[in-house]
Amino acid sequence: MPELDGWLLDLYPSPDEGLVLWLLTGEGRRRLRQVFPVTFYAAGPGPQLRELWRFLRAHPARLHLARQERRDLFLSKPQIVLAVTTAQPGDQPRLFQQAAAAFPELTYYDADLPISLRHAALYGTFPLAHCQVSVNTNDNVTGIRVLNSPWETDPEIPPLRSLFIEPDVDPAHAPPTCLHIRSERASYRLPLSPPRPLLINLRAILERHDPDLLLTYWGDTWLLPYLLEQSDQLQLPLPLNRDPAQQVIRKEARSYFAYGQVIYRGQQVHLYGRWHVDGCNAVLFHEYGMEGVFELGRVTALPIQTVARVSPGTGISAMQMITALRLGVLVPWHKQQAEQPQSALNLLHADQGGLVYQPTIGLHRDVAEIDFISMYPSIMAHFNISPETVGAEKVDAQRVPELELMISHSQPGLVPQTLQPLLDKRLKLKARLADLPAWDPRRTAYKARSTAHKWLLVTCFGYLGYKNARFGRIEAHEAVTAYGREALLRAKEAAEDLGYTVLHMYVDGLWVRKDGERQAADFQPLLEEILARTGLPIALDGVYRWVAFLPSRVDRRVPVPNRYFGLFQDGSFKLRGIEARRHDTPRFIKDVQMEMLELMGKAPQPVDSLPAQVTLLRRRLSELRSGRVPLERLLVTQTLSRTLEEYRSPSPVARAVAQLLACGKSMRPGQRVRFLFTRGEPGVQAWDAPAVGPVIPDLGRYITLLVRAASSIVGSVGVDEQTLRWWLFSNAGYGSRPGVLPPVPLDRLGSISLPLWMALPVQAGG
C-alpha cells in the first residue's frame, strides 16, 4: 500500500466517514479517512445495566455491547462495566447523552473524552506529529506510525502556511473601516465597505494562499462572525473551512467562577481542515505566543484551536486522561470522591497551604534568590503523590510530614507518570537556555515552550485539589503542601548552617545573603546542600545587586510577602506586587514607575538616584497637567466581577458598565472594562462608550495614583509619601507647614550616604 509522509494538522469525526485526518505533505494537503470506533462504559447494579443493554439494543446506531472488567483508579478491585462501542465516532456523544438521560443513576466512564485524546492514546499522535501513514486507493488510512515524540526539545518544523488578519481598530472601541491581511509573501488592505468586493477579494486571497493557520485579532468576537453574516446575506460562500463538507463551529461566550475569580471566555469560531487562533481570545497568548500554543498542543494532544483557548487546567486534565487510557484506567465522567472525615485538629494541620515568611523590610545588597524548580510538581513525582497512592495502607507506605497520611510507593501513581516527562523536558529546556548566548535565535522558541510548561505545571497542583478534577483528591493536595513546607524549612536550615542570613521565604523560594558572596558560583555549595537535604531540584534564580522588600501601605511596620522589586546583576529587574505589575494601573503610571527604576538601577547607590527621580516626576507631572499625555495612556482596566444589578454601591467599574449598557453594548462578568477617571459626574468615562461631552480627566485622581506609585520606589530608601509630596509640590523642592517640620532637603541628599541621611534630625527650613 502507498505510504504518505507528513505532519498531522487536524482530525475530527465525520457523520459517515469515521475519522477525517488532514496531513501536510510535500505534495500538498491531503484529506484522509480512518475507521475509528470509540467506546464508553457504564457501571452500576446488574438489573439497571441490563435495562441499559435493552435500551441500547433498540437504538438505530451501529453498536457493539459487551460485559467487561475494567480498572477504576479509586477502587481496589476491577469494575464490572457495560462497554458500548459505536462504529462511527460522531455517534458516540449523542448516544451517551441519551443513555445518561434515561439512566442517570449509573456511573459512566470514558464518556466525554475529546477524540484527539483517544487517537493519541492509541497511536501516539499529537498536533503536528510527523507521521508515516499507510493508505489505500480511496484515501482510507490502514496504518499510522509516528516518527517523532512530543518530548523532543527541538521538534521538527512543519511547512505551515499562515495568514494574519486584523481590523484597523479595536471593534469594541470604534467601528473598523478596513482589514489588514499579511502572509509570508504579500500584504493586503481590504475596505470593509462595500461588503461584496470585500468577500470576493478575501475569497481570492484564501484560495491563493490556502493557509493552514488563520491568526487574527478579534477574530472570534467580531471578525469571523461579521464575515459569516455578510456571506449569508449576500449568498457569497467564503471558504474559511478547508473541508467544504463541514460547517464552521461557533461556541457561545460564557462566564464562570474558578480559583477565586470570575473568568470570561469570549465566543469562539473553529474551522475544519485549517486552524483559527484569535490572539485576543487565546489564554496566555501574551505570555508565549504561537510557539507556546504549538508546544501545548504537542504535550497535551488537544487540537491547536482548542488548546489556544482553554485554561492550563484543561491541558493537565487532558494529559492525565491520555495516561489513564494508556494504562487501561477508566476516566470517570464526574468526580465522585469526597474528602475523608477527619478531626478539626488534623484539618488545622493539613489545610495550611504553602509556607510564607515575613521578609525583612528595606533595601538589601548582594542577595541570592534560590528557587525549587517546579516545586509542587517535583514533589508529586518524587514522593509518588497521586489520588490512588495517598492513604494506601501498604507495607512500603511512607508517612507525610505533619499529617496522618500514608503514601504508597509500590507502583508509580497516575499523576507522577503524567508529570515526569513534562518535568524532564522543562529541565532540558532550562539547561539549553542557560548555555545559549543572548543573541541565539533559538532562545525565543525555548522561552516560549518553557513558559507554556510552567503554566501547565503551576496548574497541576491546584487541579489536584480542584473539586471537579477527574483525578483530584484533596488529601493528595494537602500532602503536596506538607512536603513543600518541610522542604522549604530544610532549605532554610541548610542556609543558616552554612552561615547565610535568610531574608525571606515564599512557598518555593528563599532569599539569602552572606558577606563576601555576590557571584553565582559562590552559592553553588548551598544549592548542593539543599539538594542533598530535600531531594528536589533547585536552582539559583539570580543574584541581586539590590532588592527591596516593601511594607504595607496601611502600616509601614508590617511587611508584605509578595511586594518587592530588585535589580539582578545582569541589569534585569524583577517586580512583584507594585503598580507596574498590576493590570489596573494606567500605562502612563506604569511607564513612569519603570523610568524611576531604571534611574535607580543606573545610579552607583540607589539613594543617589533620588534627585533625578524627583526631576523626572516633576517633568511627568507637568506633562499630565498640560494635557500632553494621550488619553489612551490614562486608561484604567478593571474586571467586571458581577452583573451590574449585583453591585451595591456605584463603583467606578459599575458606572462605566452602566454607560456601555446604555449605548447597547453587552457586558458579562469576567470581561475587562476600560475607563477614564473624569471630572464631574459620574466621575468616569467608559472608553468604549461614546462621550456625551468633552472628556476632562480628573488630574487630581491621576496625580494621587502617580505619587502613590512613585512612593513605592522611593520608599525603599526611606522616603515616605508625605516627604515625596513636599519635594514635588513645594517651590524649592521642600517646604514647611504650620506645626510640621519639613524633611531633609532634596539638594542635600547627593553627598549623604544612605544610613546617615535616613538618621539625620530634620529642622525647620531644612
Image (spheres, rainbow, N blue to C red):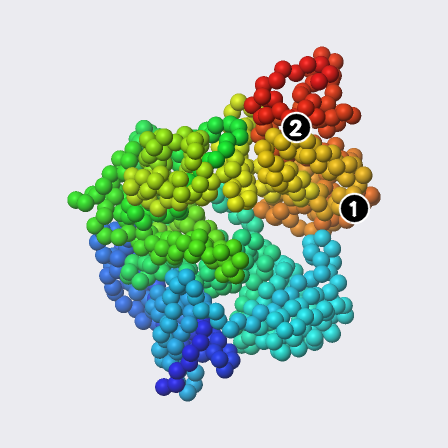
In this rendering, does residue 532 appear at all?
yes
Residue matched to label 2:
750
Q: CA distance from mark 1 to mark 2?
A: 48 Å
Q: Is residue 664 above or below residue 703?
A: below
The kind of residue tagged 1 is Ala
Count every numbered label the image shows and give the total.
2
Q: Position of residue 24 (x, y in %)?
A: 48, 76
Residue matched to label 1:
691
Q: Residue furthest top?
A: 739
Residue drawn where x is 77% and y is 70% of the image: 194
In this rendering, does residue 59 appear at all?
no
Observer-nearest of 339 and 700: 700
Residue drawn where x is 64% and y is 26% of the image: 751
In which quadrant is the C terminus drawn? Answer: top right
Residue drawn where x is 69% and y is 57% of the image: 171
Q: Secondary structure at mark 2?
A: loop
Q: Position of residue 51 (x, y in %)?
A: 31, 62
The kind of residue tagged 2 is Gly
Q: Is residue 546 above or below residue 289?
A: above
